[in-house]
Image (cartoon, grey):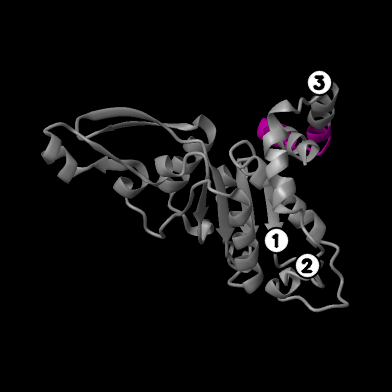
Amino acid sequence: MREDGLGDEFGLRAGEDASGWPALQRALALFTIDPVGLGGVWLRSGPDPRRDAVVAWTRAMLGDAPWLTLPGHVTDDRLYGGLALAETLARGALVHERGLLARAHGGVLVAPMAERLSTSVVAALGGALDRGELTLEREGLTERLPCRLGLVARDEGRRSEGEALPEPLRDRLAFVLDLRAPDLRGPAPAPPTPEAVHAARALLGEVELPDEALEALARGALGLGIPSLRATLLAARAARANAAL
C-alpha cells in the first residue's frame, strides 16, 4: 500500500491480485502526456469510488489544462457557443460566447454516461477530435475557433441491455479501460509520478518514431483485422508518449 493512500482511494485490499493496475495506470499517464494526440479514454465503469479516484488522478496529472464536464442534455448554444447578448448590446457589434468545445481547447472534456449521447453530440465530438477546430456560422457571425481536446468518455452502459459507446467515438479514442475487469483487484502499485509525467510532456516533441516502427504497427493492425487507420496512428502516438515517459 502506498504511503500517500492511493491504494485506499481505489478501494483495494492487500493481498489480492493487481495485475491489471500497472497497465491502466500507464495508459492514463500516456493520455495525460498527450491528451490531444491520443484522442481520449473510453472508461467503462458504473458509479464506483475507484472510478472517481482514477478521474481525479487524471485531472491532477494534467495540471493547469482545461477540464470541463459535458452536461447530460447539452444544448447547441452550450456546446458550440452562441451570441453573447449583453456584450453585443454593450459594444454595438456581434460578440460570440465560446461554448464547451472551444473552452476545452488544449485540455480534456469529460462525457458522463457517454453511451447515451445523442447522435448530434457524438458528431460534434467526433468532428472536434478529427479537425481540431470549429467553424461557427450562427446569428450572422462567422468564426473559426481552435478546438483540440482529449475526451474522457465515461461509459456506464450495461452490456446485457445492449448499451455501448457509439462507434464514432470508440474509433477515435486510444485507450479502453474497464474498471469492472477481474484483474483490477489488490493494492494498486505506485503510478508514474507527476514529475515524471510533466517531464515526459516536455520531451514529447523531441521523440521521433522510426519508419520501421510505424510499418510494424500497421502490419500488426492488418494482421489483427483492424480496418481503421486511426488505430495505427493512435498506437504510434502512444508509443511516442511511452518513449518520452
Sequence-first disc among 2 and 3: 2
Choose the circle earlier in sequence order: 1 or 3. 1
Asked whether 127 or 202 is in front, the reply is 202
For label 3, the crowd category at 10 Å Cα-Cα, with few meaning under 14, some 14 to 19 and many 20 or more, is few
Magenta stretch in the rendered image: 220-235
Residue under pointer 2: 184
State the image coordinates of residue 125 (x, y, percent, origin top left): 48, 43
Q: Residue at label 3?
A: 211
Residue 232 percent across, percent down from the top left? 73, 33
Q: Please tell me which residue is depicted at 75% across the width and 56% down the height of the picture.
A: 25
Q: Residue at x 83, y 29 (%)?
A: 219
Residue annotated with mark 1: 178
- Between the C-alphas of marks 2 and 3, the distance is 35 Å
Judge by depth and name the residue closer to the eye, 225 or 202: 202
Give the side of residue 3 with respect to residue 79, left or right: right
Reply above or below: 159 against 94: below
